[in-house]
Every structure is written in structure tokens, then in C-alpha cells.
Amino acid sequence: MPTTLRDCLAAKACDPSLTDLIATVVHTSAEISALVRRGALGEVFGALESQNVQGEVQKKLDVISNDMLLESCGASPALMAMASEEMDDIHPVRDLTPEGGYLLLFDPLDGASNIDVNGSIGTIFSILPAPRVDTPRPAVVADFLQKGRAQVAAGYVVYGPQTTLVLTLGDGVDAFTLDPETGDWLQTGSGVTIPVETKEYAINASNLR
């Protein structure tokens, strides 16, 4: 039987609080996937009049996905603050402490321009260690400005013909597929790498010129 995401994280001796945060992110991603599958029937398509911090017109599902992640992940005890492409500023959750914790960064729905044409879209996330401070205080933007190698986990979820998760904890890349019948994330790849030779690196390679 394929290994589940939680079993995989346990085998890697992952910090239980980090496991909880990752599980919350991917569980919410499964809920976002369900909304995507509903398509126009879910009344979540179309654009809003607002723009995100990148100056892009926000889609309804952009904002809905963002709110879902804020609400669900905010309940994770080890999460101190979040930052999202859909928000102008960071979203503090609880004060930084001497015990540390985690910071979560995400794009709730990357490729939102594909929503209305039934193209693949996804959620991207990164988890950083929260600074340990002697005197408790709210997180600030500077706390998020860490080097990439400081990440403790990073991954993305693609909502396509199947819902897949690609995740790294810094020691290799694993792939998981959502079983829509059980809601489990089952491991379908390990030690994932980019081929040494390939004709197509990414869809956006069409913009190379």
C-alpha cells in the first residue's frame, strides 16, 4: 500500500509541529481542489475589481483560497505569521517567543488567469523558521527576509486532471497524489529530479523569446 504523507513525514523524523502545519496546508489545498473541480457550478469564477500586491487583477477564487489558508493555518499552534501574494502586508498570528515556531509564505492560487479556461492552477508555499526572541513581539516583514536555504519545507500543489503535491524538507523531493475517495495524500514519487535532458522545461518556456 502506498505511503501516506503523514507516514512519510514521520519517517523523516519531522518536527510534529511542522508536520501539523504542512498537513494543514495540504488539507486546505484539497478543499481548494474541490472548489476548482466544481468549476462554474461553484460560483467562484470571475474577476474582482481589486488587485493584489503584484498589480494583478484578483480572481474570486484567489481571494477565497487566500481566506481559506489564513483561517485554517492560523489555528496551527506553531505558526507565528503568514505572508501571501494576495495581501499588501504580512498577517501576524501570534507573538514570536523564545521557543520559535514557523512562518508561512504562499501564493494561494498561482496561474489564476487559467481558471476560466480550465487550465492547470496551483498553490505554492514555503515554510521558514520564526526568529527566537527574548521578549515576545509580533512578527514584522524583516522576519520573513531570510535566505532560501533557511527554508524548512517548500512545495506546491497542482490542481489538474489529478491533484498532486510536490514537497521537499531539504533532503530530496517527494511527490504525492490526492485520493479523492479517501482524502489521503499517497506517495507516488520519491527522489524526484529534473531530467538531465528534456525538450520542455515549463509551459512558460513558450515565452523564452
Image: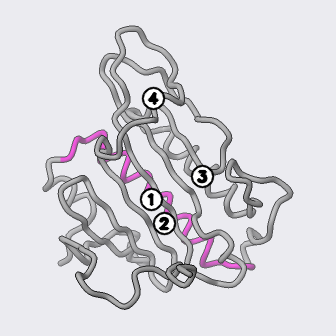
Give the structural element (helix, strand or loop) at label 4.
Answer: helix
Please check the rendered image and state whether residue 30 is part of the magenta-colored stretch, yes or no: yes
Q: Main secondary structure of the magenta part?
A: helix
Classify mark 3: residues with Cα within 10 Å, few (<14), some (14-19) or many (20+): some
The location of residue 73, given as percent across then percent down, is 49, 44
User: If you read the primary sequence from the N terminus, does the residue marked by circle 4 or circle 3 appear first?
Assistant: 3
Which numbered dot is residue 143?
4
The correct choice, above or below, for 116 with respect to 75 in the image is: below
Residue at mark 4 to residue at mark 3: CA–CA distance:
23 Å
Q: How far from the left and from the top, in percent, is residue 187?
A: 25, 72
Q: CA distance from mark 2 to mark 1?
A: 5 Å
- Element carrying mark 2: helix
- Choose mark 1 or mark 4, whichever is in front: 4
Amino acid at the residue labelled 1: His
Marks 3 and 2 in Cβ contact (< 8 Å):
no
For this view, does 175 lie left or right of residue 181? left
Give the number of the disc on residue 103: none
Residue wearing tag 2: 30
- Dot 4: few (<14), some (14–19), or many (≥20) neighbours within 10 Å? some
Magenta residues, start to end: 14-40
Element under disc 3: helix
Rendered location of residue 153, percent (x, y): 32, 50
The reply to whether discs 2 and 1 touch (Cβ–Cβ < 8 Å) is: yes
Say which quarter of the image contains residue 4. bottom left
Q: How many marks?
A: 4
